[in-house]
Image (tube, rainbow, N blue to C red):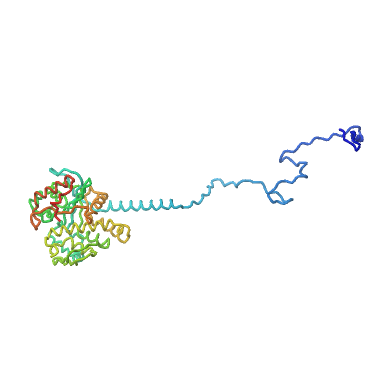
Amino acid sequence: MTYGGDDGRRRMPPPRPPQPGGQRPRQSAQMMPLPGRGPSPYDGRTRPMGRPGQSPGEPPPPPYQGPPDRPAGASRPRRRRRWGVGRILMTLLLVFVLFLGGVWAYLEFSINRVEALSDYSGRPAAASGANWLIVGSDSRAGLTAQQEENLATGGESDAGGQRTDTIMIAHVPDNSAKPTLLSLPRDSQVKIPGHGTSKINSAFTLGGPQLLVKTVEGATGLHIDHYAEIGFGGFANIVDAIGGVDMCIDKDMNDEMTGIDIKAGCQQLDGRQALGFVRMRHSSATPRSDLDRVANQRKFIGALVSQIASPGTLLNPFDFFPLLSSAPDALTIDSGDHLHNLVGLAIAMRGISDGGVTTTTVPVTSGSAEHWDKSKSQQLFDALKNDTEVPAGIVVN
């Protein structure tokens, strides 16, 4: 190697003095130690990297060792989940559905049932739509003497046996025709199978629901598909359970036979007053006797069904739960009927108050309502059998 001097000439570096032994010592080669295998010659000249802001001489942080091992068999801790709005709404919906299911099951298995419908030779064939036979029984069974006095029903001996105070046919069509609520006057003279000709309500006394259904089918030619019955006590209990029924009375109604006195005007009828209203026929407000009574019965049923099905009743626990407890004991249906059949009937009859249901009485020949007008009655029954509108000319209000 050469280097330049002050005079610009190249010179050789001065020779190094000889070492003892005549040979220049050789420097042993050193390899960089592998990481973690020992100290490095550069350790004294470099500073290990540390945390940001770590001062020199501060010991480095301990190496990361990972999360501690869980004991054998220990479960992973669960994360606490938050309840969002959607989850709360779904829970409330599930509770509501379960509640409705419980109420439905309770009613389905609690309502009284009876063998009312039976097949027999010559029974009218089933036709379009569905026909309900709705019966209001004047039975005092289950009423105490005090209840009989309060409801002004008279005693069991006064009734002369169990009879039907109300007989109606509710026709629910399969098409867009109006439903029909038809009253059969209880004094109508008809043929009772095996008992000759007598008042239609005596069929119940002679043979119970089965004979009454058979009598009605024979007199009208209509196939009865469903049966529902309610007694005096049950009727009053249902009215009281929902806190009474709102009615507008056209005239003062005073029946000296029952002691029921109802003033004209819009008011709320309790169970006792309601029972007197649907039974009253010996009053100046009911000059047509039984014809006025059955008209009042249809009017009240319309108001009762509308009020029961209203949100004010179904969403009010002070009305809903008393109704829920009183309805099963008040009603009796055929053994083949179910709760959904009753719901369908109630929905169809809700239109009574606003004209959505045709309400009429079997056309009769006189005010006593003992004999039916054969021609007009047949037109009425044919309309129901064929699921068509009842001709306006034969409607009896």
Q: Where does the image place residue 96, in percent across and percent down from the top left?
A: 36, 53
Quadrant that contains the C terminus: bottom left
Q: Where does the image place residue 98, in percent across and percent down from the top left?
A: 36, 51
Q: Where does the image place residue 387, in percent across and percent down from the top left?
A: 18, 46
**What's the residue at 14%, 44% (across, down)?**
124
Q: Residue 123's image quarter?
A: top left
Quadrant that contains the N terminus: top right
Q: Residue 115 or 342: which is nearer the viewer?
A: 342
**What's the residue at 32%, 58% (across, down)?**
315
Q: Report whether 68 appears left or right of 21.
A: left
Q: Where does the image place residue 381, in percent across and percent down from the top left?
A: 14, 48
Q: Report whether 33 appears left or right of 378.
A: right
Residue extending farthest to the front is 8
365 w.r.t. 267: above or below: above
**What's the residue at 16%, 58% (across, down)?**
295
The number of numbered discs placed on residues in the rendered structure image is 0
